[in-house]
Amino acid sequence: MGNAIKYLFITVLLSLLTGSIFASERNPFTGTIVVEWIDDVDNRKMRLLEEFSYTDPKGKVWKVPKGAVIDGASIPQVFWSFIGPPFVGAYRKASVVHDYFCETKSESWEEVHRMFFDASLDGGVSVAKATTMYTAVYAGGPRWKKVRLIGSSPQDEPLIISVSPLLKDQKLLRAMEWANKHDVSIDEIEKHVDELAKADK
């Protein structure tokens, strides 16, 4: 009788522990990517028909509203030869969110690009590919800064100015190849790319 009670207790305990583990699993993406094509010259623009969002590892929610227009322009085209176009494959969800926030510029470009790295991993991209992709957006993706005009009051919205990418074309490709061949963190990628950019000045 004693052994039966012990067995029952262990079974119940394991069930509770297993249940709590599965219950605590993070589901980072909310919604389904449903789009319609918009007729334009490049035939790349799409409109989201449903809200979609991503919750990063720190708990920040990156919400893309229904009606948002995306076109994959936030991902450097030179990168497509490595993985494929933005809306194909495991990084599709990450590219949709990244595209929207690169367009609105409502968050800093640093946060937006790091979010892309996290969302790529959560979307099923391997660490090796995600680091190469991060190199692409950090070195060749959109950048911007907020500036205040002389004479503006603290209540006035700052002006958002686009900044040129650090690397382009062959230099960007070399940086991506370097990241692809080495086991590096995103901090090391940023340092390497910044050094390459300084060497060009």
Image (cartoon, rainbow, N blue to C red):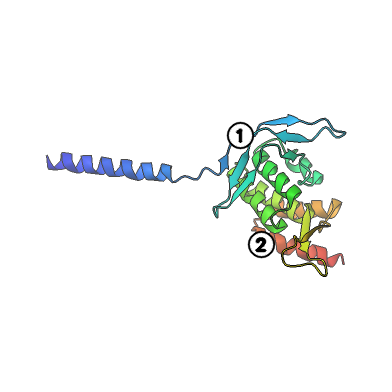
Image location of residue 67, percent across then percent down: 70, 37
Q: Which residue is mark 1?
A: 32
Q: Is residue 178 left or right of residue 90?
A: right
Image location of residue 24, percent across then percent down: 44, 46
4 w.r.t. 146: above or below: above
The N terminus, quarter of image: top left
Secondary structure state at the residue bearing disc 1:
loop
Most foreground residue, 83 or 45: 45
Q: Which residue is mark 2?
A: 187
The C terminus, quarter of image: bottom right
Q: Residue at x 79, y 44 (%)?
A: 73
Name of the residue lying farthest toward the bottom: 151
Identify the mark at residue 68; answer none if there is no mark: none
Q: Residue at x 55, y 44 (%)?
A: 28
Q: Is residue 181 shown to the viewer in this render? A: no
Residue type, mark 2 in image: Asp
Q: Residue at x 62, y 39 (%)?
A: 52
Name of the residue lying farthest toward the left: 1
Q: Is residue 149 shown to the viewer in this render? A: yes
Most foreground residue, 49 or 59: 49
Crowding at label 2, few (<14), some or many (≥20) Cα neighbours within 10 Å? few
Residue type, mark 1 in image: Thr
Marks 1 & 2, CB-CB < 8 Å contact: no
Q: How many marks?
A: 2
172 w.r.t. 124: above or below: below
